[in-house]
Amino acid sequence: MSKNIFDTDSEIEFLFTLYGNNSNTKTLVVNENGTIISSIAYKVGLYKSDIDTQNPTWIKNTDSRIKMILSDVNSSENKKYIYSSPGKATLS
């Protein structure tokens, strides 16, 4: 949940991953009004080791923007994809 990471409006956004078989797994960012900001198929960022932490290792604050690093569930090569968010915020 955030207020200025995944977009620049004043509404709260929610990021979550829907797990299914690999073809149904996707990561979504949804605005508080229900608008889907982003739907990224076959990519996940949440791992069991991250669920219990306050600072997920797959969201990084850089000098320019916040980056989200997702893994491809269909890749046997452990491929990673980097997404840049339009918002800016302090991660803590």
Image: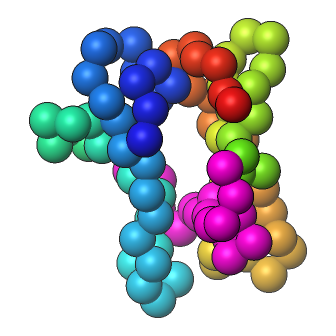
The picture quadrant where one finds residue 50 is: bottom right
Where is residue 89? Give x, y as percent.
58, 17
The residue under the point 75% across, 34% down is: 60
Where is residue 46? Give x, y as percent.
62, 64
Q: Nearer the viewer, residue 85 or 14?
A: 14
The picture quadrant where one finds residue 23 is: bottom left
The single residue placed furthest to the bottom in the displayed view is 21
Q: Report the side of 39 relative to 34 (left or right).
A: right
Q: Report the side of 30 relative to 71 (left or right).
A: left
Quadrant where the image shows the C terminus: top right
The picture quadrant where one finds residue 75 is: bottom right
The residue under the point 51% across, 25% down is: 5
Residue 47 magenta: yes
The residue under the point 52% across, 83% down is: 22
Q: Nearer the viewer, residue 84 or 17?
A: 17
Q: Nearer the viewer, residue 54 or 8?
A: 54
Where is residue 27? Give x, y as percent.
46, 58
The single residue placed furthest to the right in the displayed view is 77
Q: Could you tell me how many numbered marks the image carries?
A: 0
Q: Report the side of 79 relative to 86 (left or right).
A: right
Q: Is residue 69 visible?
A: no
Coloured how?
Answer: rainbow
Q: Is residue 53 visible?
A: yes
Residue span colored magenta: 37-54
Where is residue 3? Give x, y as percent.
40, 24
Q: Report the side of 91 relative to 15 (left or right).
A: right
The residue under the point 82% across, 71% down is: 78
Quadrant where the image shows the N terminus: top left
Residue 27 magenta: no
